Amino acid sequence: MTLKNILPGRLGFGTAPLGNMFRAIPDEEARATVEAAWDQGIRYYDTAPFYGAGLSEQRLGQVLSTKPRDEFVLSTKVGRVILDGLEEGARDLGEKGGIFEHGNPNKIVHEWTAEATERSIEG
């Protein structure tokens, strides 16, 4: 594989809406959206654990796991780790609190260590 083979195009797909940003969207709509982007030649995808407490990453991963790995570029962020446990009570996300109110109910912790980054990549 050469570097040329993995460079994304000029256009990428930001996946915050797949994390139920502002509204809950059905899984099938999320899947169809990623498939449509792929069909139109999009090969760069950006996501983050913050987008719906991992929901965006999960939905994107379901589709991209069916695609040839050497044909797309994926970026995400570090610093937030999604836990298996569920959040008890209201989640405090500051000024961004209402953006992903329809996302996963999982606990989110802030952890900026190398170990947390490695666990996030593995996950």
Image (tube, rainbow, N blue to C red):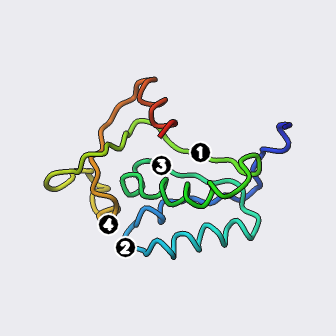
Identify the disc placed on residue 48: 3
Graded by Cα atoms within 10 Å as few (under 14), some (14 to 19) or many (20 or more), the crowding at tag 3 reads many
* x 47%, y 48%: residue: 48
Q: Which amino acid does label 3 sit on?
A: Ala
**Which tag, 4 or 1, sits closer to the chain's start?**
1
What is the distance, in whole Å, between disc 1 and disc 2 at their CAs?
23 Å
* Foreground residue among 57 and 77: 57
**Which tag, 3 or 4, sits closer to the chain's start?**
3
What is the distance, in whole Å, between disc 2 and disc 3 at their CAs?
17 Å
Discs 1, 3 touching: Cβ within 8 Å: no
Identify the disc placed on residue 52: none
Question: SS of the residue at dot 3?
Answer: loop
What is the distance, in whole Å, between disc 3 and disc 4 at their CAs?
16 Å
**Which tag, 1 or 3, sits closer to the chain's start?**
3
Q: What residue type is labelled 2?
A: Arg
* x 42%, y 58%: residue: 55
Q: Which amino acid does label 1 sit on?
A: Ser
Question: SS of the residue at dot 4?
Answer: loop
What is the distance, in whole Å, between disc 4 and disc 1 at their CAs?
23 Å
**Which tag, 1 or 2, sits closer to the chain's start?**
2
Q: Quadrant of the N terminus?
A: top right
Question: SS of the residue at dot 1?
Answer: strand
- The residue under label 2 is 23
Q: What residue type is labelled 4?
A: His
- The residue under label 4 is 102
Q: Where is residue 17 in the image (x, y as percent from the top left)?
A: 47, 65
- The residue under label 1 is 75
What is the distance, in whole Å, between disc 4 and disc 2 at their CAs?
6 Å
Q: Which residue lies furthest to the front in this view?
A: 66
